[in-house]
Image: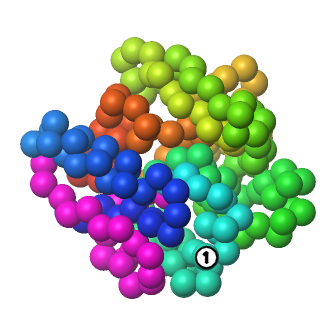
Amino acid sequence: MRIGVIAIQGAVSEHVDALEHALLERGEVAEIVTIKHSGLVPTCDGLILPGGESTTLGSLLVREGIADEIKEAAAHGMPIMGTCAGLILLAKEGDSQVEKTHQDLLSLMDVKVNRNAFGRQHESFEANLDVSVLDSQYNAVFIRAPAIVEYGNDVKVLSKVGEFVVAAEQGNLLALAFHPELTDDLRLHQYFLDRVFGR
């Protein structure tokens, strides 16, 4: 098994650490690769799109030829988890901010996102969430977080903060508005690994 973490910018090492600990917990072995150039995505069994600055991330993914590889992998059923900026990139549609910056989106999930739904950096916060696929509350870290404001019939909502959807899935795609790699709670990484290992 091989799991890729897009490593152009953002919380890359934290995701790698979380995956390593999660694999250790479950007694599974997988190679974790950080991806900065095209050619590696097709060799992976699962993929994480971490946080960062979504406009920069999107344009670099296109420039490096990685965006097309991700679309191809998603079409063939590869489990993909996008966190924070990764959620924005997975979306089919963005708000006026996304349109104004001509942001490149992967357009894989039938969702519309609000890029700064919860405000700027200084308005970051933590919240205890009810997540439908977990057995108890999850303490989520939100940093300049986006949110899903509209979604199609095939999208399954996993968690909300008020009216904002902050966790959702559609087929093999999992989108989180928060940063699961910044907590010691590995349950969402485990949920993602369940998909990678086909459980």
Tell me where residue 192 appears, x and y as whole percent. Answer: 36, 45
Tell me where residue 4 appears, x and y as whole percent. Answer: 35, 64
- Return the residue nearer the eye: 155 or 130: 130
Q: Secondary structure at mark 1?
A: helix
* Residue occupied by mark 1: 60
Q: Callout 1, which amino acid?
A: Leu
Tell me where residue 65 appears, x and y as whole percent. Answer: 54, 84
Residue 107 at least partly seen: no
Question: From what the image shows, is residue 143 above or below residue 92?
Answer: above
Q: Is residue 33 magenta?
A: yes
Q: Is residue 115 magenta?
A: no
At x 42%, y 27%, the residue is 133
Other-residue count near label 1 (Cα within 10 Å), few / some / many at <14 / 14–19 / ≥20: some
Q: Is residue 9 left or right of residue 194?
A: right
At x 53%, y 47%, the residue is 83
Looking at the figure, which quarter contains the C terminus? top left
At x 52%, y 17%, the residue is 128
Location of residue 185 (image quadrant)? top left
Furthest-left residue in this view: 27
Residue range in magenta is 28-49
Q: Is residue 71 left or right of residue 40?
A: right
Question: From what the image shows, is residue 137 above or below residue 158?
Answer: above
Looking at the figure, which quarter contains the N terminus? bottom left
- Return the residue nearer the eye: 112 or 104: 104
Tell me where residue 76 appears, x and y as whole percent. Answer: 43, 69
Instruction: Tell me how many marks there are.
Output: 1
Way the structure is coloured: rainbow
At x 36%, y 78%, the residue is 40
Residue 74 at least partly seen: yes
